[in-house]
Image (cartoon, rainbow, N blue to C red):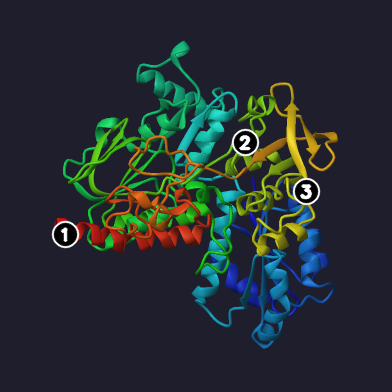
Amino acid sequence: MPNPAILLVSDQYAEILETQFWRYQREYDLHVAHSAEEAMAATERIHAAGGQVALFVADSRLADVHVLKAFHDWRSIVPTARRLVTASWENFLEDSTAFRPGLAKGKFDAFLLMPRGIRDEEFHTAITEMLSDWGSTSATPEVDSVRIVTPTVDGSTLSIRDFLYRMGMPTRTYGPESPVGQEILAELADAGVSGTEVRFPVVKPMNGTPVCAPTVHDVAISIYGAPSDIDVDQVVDLAIVRGGPAGLAAAVYGASEGLSTVVVEAEAIGGQAGTSSMIRNYLGFPRGISGMRLAQRARSQAIRFGTRFFTGWPVEKLTLGEDHHVLSTGGGELRARSVVIASGVAYRKLQVEAVDSLVGRGVFYGAAMTAAREMEDRDVFVVGGGNSAGQAAVHLSRFARSVTILIRRPSLAETMSSYLINEVEYNPRITVRGCGEVVDGGGEGQLDWIEIRDTTNGTLSRHQAGGLFLLLGAEPHCEWLPDGVVRDAKGFVLTGRDVPKETWVNGLPPGNLETTAPGVFAVGDIRADSMKRVASASGEGASVVPLVHAWLEPRR
């Protein structure tokens, strides 16, 4: 298998680009073309040989065709490649203005000034970020930190792979009959599990012992520890339930300001945002950042300040107390003077039995990032009109033959950010169908078709479908909360002036992010009337820490 290719395209500046990209030639095959036509021929040769193009780097001014037309043509052959426009110093100001609309519509991924000398690390930081993004979402991992052995890639395997992806752990799947599979099963037999005792999938963590781990919970325990590992003896200042953007922000700011801070996470950190292939409107990341990378960086930042994370244990109960509260999990109890509820929301179920019976076999709730590679040359449907659905559709279009976004409303205008609507409209593989809903589906052990009802006239139509991704909006799960934490009719936690007046103390409402239970706060999507955006959730996570300080100060 050849190395992935980086294709450099320029007439006047080809030599400069080739010199700048020498540092990548050990792990990538560099190809230089002096025109779009020459680049197309090189792309076809690479594709025909079974190779991959990781990155197109094109001069902003090509001699034979406009560079955006060239990108469109190259993308028809290699849709997974990242696309960079680079402009020379004399053309940069003029071309940066001209190319701005195309960048906003997703016609390419980045616009950079061409390096004028050696060690232009700002330029190469962008290059490595793009290659990293390509490597984590499009390419098969070359180095795996976790190996999965299974005869079939079923729903359980896909859930485990998504969990490991969100935890930043490169993963590969092997059949039991493969050399790697045989080696891992032999190691499992040496540990006393063999023959009919083996339950697939078998998971082998890096430098660890293989285990039969049929669920995400089992994998989390095998990697992060057994129940007895929740060993916090003292009463901590701050306990945070779940590690989405809001919980991670609270952890960073709480620990950095000297609070003893613990995060209890049921699955992978990042919440729903952690499944996003690319978030382009988050402050400070002009080229975008995947939800997984954002969550991993925030987790590392929180750990640096002293936050402790316990992964794999959902909180089952919150017991309120005067001096401290108690969080109960399957792995033990945690006592805390203050609690921040950042448990986020889950996608609503379709509640069509024939479709739900195929979850993991062509039907997925959420973006299911690792399932995207299995959608190659299939017709795929994404149900939902929010940003998560738009990001999933754009990512799936790199693999699927076609992607249809299905929504009940007439258009996406009311529910999706403008920048994503522009990307969706430009992408030739994506179409939007309004006023429709999935009412049936089926297939022989795998999703083959779905039935759509037109919500305006009730007519039914059947469509071939190789994949169905359901991102149906927010549904809170707060069954573990006591009655002392009041929620609205939909189950979202009430805070501040939204709580019932009869619960106010001395005629005053709780603080803006404080619940009806003293010392218990709520941030992010779980809070009633929150914005349901990554940036707003992060802001609330940071904003809650001063309120926690104010609560703790008289009690110190």
Q: Going by the picture, which residue comes out furthest to the left?
A: 556
Q: Position of residue 549 (x, y in %)?
A: 25, 61
Q: Position of residue 507 (x, y in %)?
A: 31, 58
| In-front residue for pair 489/18 | 489
Q: Going by the picture, which residue comes out furthest to the bottom?
A: 90
Real-space Cα separation, disc 3 to disc 1, in angstroms: 55 Å
Real-space Cα separation, disc 2 to disc 3, in angstroms: 21 Å
Up the image or down, 556 lies above or below 314; here it is: below
Up the image or down, 437 lies above or below 149; here it is: below
Which residue was labeled with disc 2? 364
| In-front residue for pair 282/427 | 282
- In which quadrant is the N terminus drawn? top right
Viewer-nearest of discs 2 and 1:
1
Disc 1 marks a residue whose amino acid type is: Pro
Which residue was labeled with disc 3? 434
Up the image or down, 170 lies above or below 37; here it is: above
Quick check: 315 left or right of 110? left
Quick check: 549 left or right of 48? left
Real-space Cα separation, disc 2 to disc 1, in angstroms: 48 Å
Quadrant of the rendered image containing residue 480: top left
Q: Position of residue 166 (x, y in %)?
A: 48, 46
Up the image or down, 422 lies above or below 260; here it is: below
